[in-house]
Image (cartoon, rainbow, N blue to C red):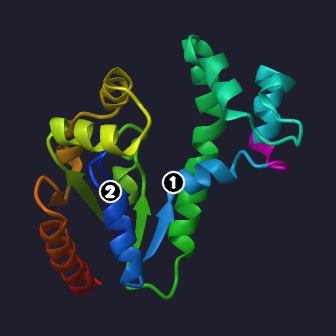
Amino acid sequence: MLKVGLTGGIGSGKSTVAKSLIAKGITVVDADQIAREVVEPGEVALQEIVEAFGEQILHDDDTLNRAALKQVIFSDPKAKKQLESILHPRIRQRILSRVNEATNTAYVVADIPLLVESHYPDHFDRVIVVDCPVEQQLSRVLERDHLNEAQIKAIINSQASREQRLAVATDVLDNSGTLESLKMQIDKLHETLISLV
């Protein structure tokens, strides 16, 4: 099975690419979805987070109170590292398991926002980077999310740089133009990937 990593900075259009591939019948493993799964009630990761940060990070129904957890780790780099040490290995293991278990698909794609930062490229045969200028990322996220410019810039700066992502790419989708242009590139890339299977 051809294993493909998909990444791009916030506002790059990565979700649009993932949805297009799903529409073509391709299995897409969603890292964000898995990150939510590993902290559901009954999961070991949630128990460890409660042990590390206390009951105040839970809602009354024992689900994770993300806002409370963010408050705890926001100003404490040590707490953030501790949280990452609980979550990241479990998320990685689950992503790679789902990729390895994929069947009934021409190839399998793992949609991982932090693919470069979390050192995933070696796990994939190809890495697709959805790319656009930082100014475009900023204007798209301003339009889409309820964040101010400073918050968006902080997120962009916390992610791998455009150059770092492009350095690991085997395939680049240029999303600086129209949606039509992006879809044509996706179609072409899809054909290329199928020809490699």
According to the image, label 1 marks what residue? Answer: 31
Q: Nearer the viewer, residue 121 or 81?
A: 81
Residue stretch rendered in magenta on the structure: 41-45
* Mark 2 residue crowding within 10 angstroms, few (<14) / some (14–19) / many (20+): many
Residue 155: x and y, percent? 37, 29
Give the number of the disc on residue 14: 2
In-image side of 163 versus 122 (left or right) = left
Q: Disc 1 vs disc 2: Cβ atoms closer than 8 Å?
A: no
Q: Which is more foreground, mark 1 or mark 2?
A: 2
| x and y, in percent, of residue 95 in the image | 54, 58
Q: CA distance from mark 1 to mark 2?
A: 12 Å
Q: Earlier in the sequence, mark 1 or mark 2?
A: 2
Quadrant location of the C terminus in the rendered image: bottom left
The percent position of residue 5, horizontal first and vertical second, equals 36, 60
Disc 1 on helix, strand or loop?
Answer: helix
Give the residue displayed 39% in from the left and 80% down from the top.
23
- Relative side of 86 to 48, left or right: left
- Image coordinates for residue 136, horizontal then vertical, percent: 18, 42
Check if residue 139 falls in the magenta segment: no
Q: Secondary structure at mark 2?
A: helix
User: Relative to 33, is 184 above or below?
Assistant: below
Say left or right for 103 vs 160.
right
Q: In front here: 96 or 32?
A: 32
Name the main secondary structure of what is drawn in magenta. Answer: loop
Query: Could you tell me if residue 2 is visible in this image?
Result: no
Q: Residues within 10 Å of mark 1 (few under 14, many from 20)?
A: some
Which of the 4 image quadrants contains residue 57?
Answer: top right
